[in-house]
Image (cartoon, rainbow, N blue to C red):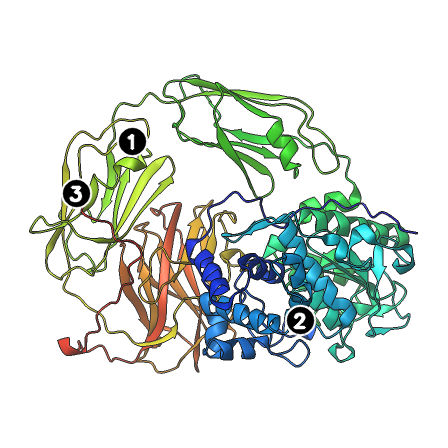
Amino acid sequence: MKKQLLLLILVACSALARAEDPGIAYHFESAARQYGIPVDVLKAVSYAETKFYHHVPEGATSHNGKPSVYGIMGLRNDSWFGYSLKIGASLINRTEQEVIDNVQYNIQAGAAYLAHIAAKHTEITADLNSWKRAVEEYSGIPQTDIKEFYSFDVFHGLKNGGDCNGVQLMAHPEINMAQFSERVNPANKLKNIESNDYPSAVWSASPNFTPGNIQQKFSVVHDTEGGFAGSLSWLQNPTAQASTHYIIRSSDGYIVQMVLEANKAWHVSCWNGYMLGVEHEGYVANPAFFTDAMYISSAALFRHFSTKFNIPFNRNRIIGHYEWQNSAWKTWMTANFPAIGLTCNTHTDPGPGWDWGFYMQLVSQDTAKPAVASYSPKAVTPADTFMLNTPIKITFTQKMKAANAQSAFSISPTVAGSFSWENNRTLVFKPYVPLATNTVYTVKLTNTAINYLNYTIADTLTFSFKTVQYNALNVVMTYPAANQSNVLKTVRAIAKFDFPLDQTTLAANIGLMDSMNSILALKSMRYIEENNQGIVYLTPKQKLEGNKDYSIIIKRNLKNSAGNAIGVDTKITFHTASTDYVTGTVIDELETVGSWKDPGYSGSTVGTDPNFTKFTISSEEFFSGANSGKITYLFTAADGVARTFNGAKPNVGSLPERKAGFWVNGDVSKNLLEYWFYYNNSTNVIVPVDTLNWSGWKLVEVPLSAVTGAGDKLLHSVVIRRASNGSASGAVYIDAMQTNDATGVAPAPAQLKPLSFTLEQNYPNPF
């Protein structure tokens, strides 16, 4: 007899709401067309494997000794899952390392490999449902009964669609999920495959366990560092020497039990005899896999543990695998469980992306009602006014059901706009067009807003604010400033205005000019809004000439978003330097994320907003290749530090005369730039290297003689430290990490290497 399993099914990322990354979208379309496969099948494989995240592992194995997956397509290179990386690279005539590092080649290799498989499957037709067996073969999973878990994830994405990491997968309602067996599909689950310990789970035994020999004192949250099906496959491999009591699928919270609760699973080394373990599909570096459905399903399982084994509902006993790094927990353990060693683990899962507050609320079924913690804009005095592009924010004390909270929101006079969420707690409403000037707006949030335990906020929230009356547009700052000299020939000019701009007036009214009054072609013109100001970035198509005059030109018809023009023509003239640089030996081209981590990964990052302080690979600005690393930061404290750590810890040698560093495109923030080194692999040395008072590409190197300690030096971190007069926010680009063995003697002109730029967009004469 079938038993219905009721699950809240939510996609891992947002609905199709954001603009798609044109570069990645093109690579998917191009590869699918080249190899004759449906683009959405190709995307669905990537979505299931990595949620469109280009994963570059640090080694051949990851979690629990499981072989690593490579790149956005989740390619493999091992004896258990097969050699899709090797075969795919061969099919597109690229090296395996190129396919690992480069997103485009990774997509091409995945497409070529999938097409190679499809050629053997005569059942494939124009119907996307016919790709089931080919997709299962792509997985490389050796067990026949587990392969279908993989195709279920791929087809679940195909049916429902998704939007992650700037890539969109369209929904296909025609996908038939009934073709999947009762073992795989929760809608078809049969009672005879239920777990005896926890009937909401399916039983699928692992051979890796110790009978009995466990005291169930703790329950542990893990993540798989890979897909659900591949992880399930690996944990059934007798040679893996690893297992878990349960494993949970991202897309719908489906649970499989692998080891009986009365037996010791092999998941936390010397802690195994005291701890129940649950693997959650996902990655430390990619919390997109941690869906609401997964949290709800997992919380019910952990509540079962606590009820059955009297495990208290607190964070000392319900822990993450990384707790060995938690000094407070270690102190508590020493006092309460001194027999349990604290140094036998090294893993960091589930990582900073796991929402412990929300999770523990679900586990304990906390009856505390949600409340509004803060809101903005908030008028302190009747005279307070706010900018026309001011977003409206309401922060709750708990995670709320998004649809209910958004339905409870209204604004009068009525304004069309979009909703988003910050940090799972703050509802953000952003008007599509600027608000009217000199107008009072009233915001209401009714008490129909509810949390995930269906508790409502106690009272309706109502607040009002008034917009500014604005009559003119003014220039706040330019870089370079008027008459500034020694400006980099790679300068990225900046013009900051005291009000958001009417973007339709940009192209015709702002640009760069040489001393002969000729308008320069631009590689890119970027516009952003920050702190209610409009900021324009102008990057020349070609490097400027040295020792020459150039100008930023702002024409009188440039307007703000309220329709007010600046009214006068402005010319800001600056003079370039004659300095050039020698390019050294490149260690990291910063074309892919590789081993670089978000600043939030490091405990040394303090006084920053984690929602905005990020490291990404960006094509907005680059010194060489097509990308660079972008460090975006927002300081919340005067002594804020944003540390971007490279887990590969590149070795730059030990020669005192050698220099090491990066090409850096600064943000004129006046904050401090530091490089952090290890010597003896672990002793940290902080080297202050520059003040971020420029924009444009500059080679920022330090001699290794400045790094104390003996032996090889490992350049492991780029750090931005807030200065007393520094900006609270900014974005710095780094590229072409390199060493240079030059002794400091100025090279002859013939040795100078010109900068190479790739055209992103060529803006014509704006006037």
Residue 70 percent coordinates (x, y): 56, 70
589 lies left or right of 559: right
Indicate the secondary structure of the residue bearing disc 3: strand
Q: Is residue 271 above or below residue 77?
A: above
Q: Residue at x 18, y 29 (%)?
A: 567
Q: Which mark is residue 406?
A: none
For this rendering, which residue is in front, 48 or 42? 42
What x and y, as percent, mark residue 437? 36, 21
Q: Amino acid at mark 2?
A: Glu
- Where is residue 274? Give x, y as percent: 83, 65
Q: CA distance from mark 2 to mark 1?
A: 56 Å
Crowd around label 3: few <14 · some 14–19 · many ≥20 (10 Å):
many
Q: Earlier in the sequence, mark 1 or mark 3?
A: 3
Q: Residues within 10 Å of mark 1 (few under 14, many from 20)?
A: many
Amino acid carrying mark 1 in the image: Asn
Q: Quadrant of the C terminus?
A: top left
The label on residue 560 is 1
Q: Which residue is under mark 2?
A: 137
